[in-house]
Image (spheres, rainbow, N blue to C red):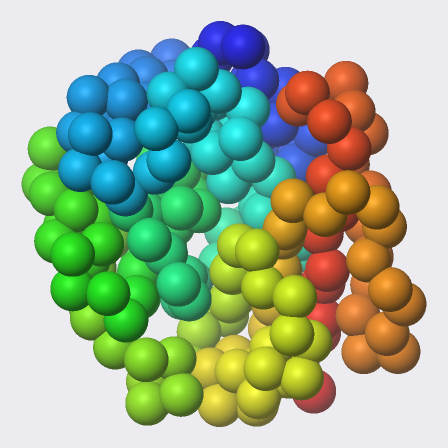
Amino acid sequence: MSVQAAVRAGEWAGWPLGPAQLELLERFADWLIGEAVPAGGLGPNEAERVWSRHVGDSLLFAGGWPLSEPPQSVVDVGTGVGLPGIPLAILWPDSHILLTDRSGRRVDLARRAVRVLGLMNAEVVQVDAGRLRKEADLLVARAVADVDLVRQWVRHLVKPGGRAVVGGSWEERPAADPDFDVVEVPPWVLDRPVWLRIMAAA
């Protein structure tokens, strides 16, 4: 799987990628393979599928934003080594992307990636989401199964009218919940079916 996974993901999300964005995404993919995997920020087997499982997957979150203009502010909860926040910062250079994680080691890695890529619109902080006091237009989080936890985050982290988009590597469609729309990403985009949970803030 190659950069074409990112191209397809951007097209599916409604945000086609330009040459400069693709170049930055390639640099990020190289950084993930060359630094994040050896440092333990990603699993040892992730290098061979970094485009589909990480870079392309991250771009899918943009498909949960309903407007034609990018959000002014995005908060990425549990970013790890910068996923999905760094690909979204590359996709939306005029948006402020706040990447958060509880792990100091992962935050150090994400900060390193932001510096390497020269992303002026991305900020990385070590904080528990429950202690964060900053409202954003869009909240994103990968691999979060606890919908009650997401509801709590939306109440204090998302502006009225904003959105929360939660992804995960579920093997089947997530259970229905009245607060969330479930969107299936068709398998031709990446190498497997992917589902996104989308919640609108009141």
Does 11 appear above or below 93?
above
Horizontally, residue 39 falls left or right of residue 57, namely: left
Instruction: Find residue 130 and report its image quarter.
Output: bottom left
Closer to us: 127 or 76:
127
Does 55 appear above or below 170?
above
What residue do we see at 59% from left, 82% from top?
Answer: 149
Does 49 appear above or below 154?
above
The percent coordinates of residue 50 (x first, y second) are: 43, 24
Closer to us: 7 or 178:
178
Q: Can residue 70 be seen in this view?
A: yes
Closer to us: 131 or 23:
131
The percent coordinates of residue 144 (x first, y second) are: 58, 64
What residue do we see at 28% from left, 22% from top?
Answer: 33
What residue do we see at 66% from left, 23% from top?
Answer: 190
Q: Is residue 24 visible?
A: no
What residue do we see at 27% from left, 31% from top?
Answer: 37
Horizontally, residue 122 falls left or right of residue 137, namely: left
The percent coordinates of residue 49 (x first, y second) are: 48, 20
The percent coordinates of residue 108 (x first, y second) are: 12, 53
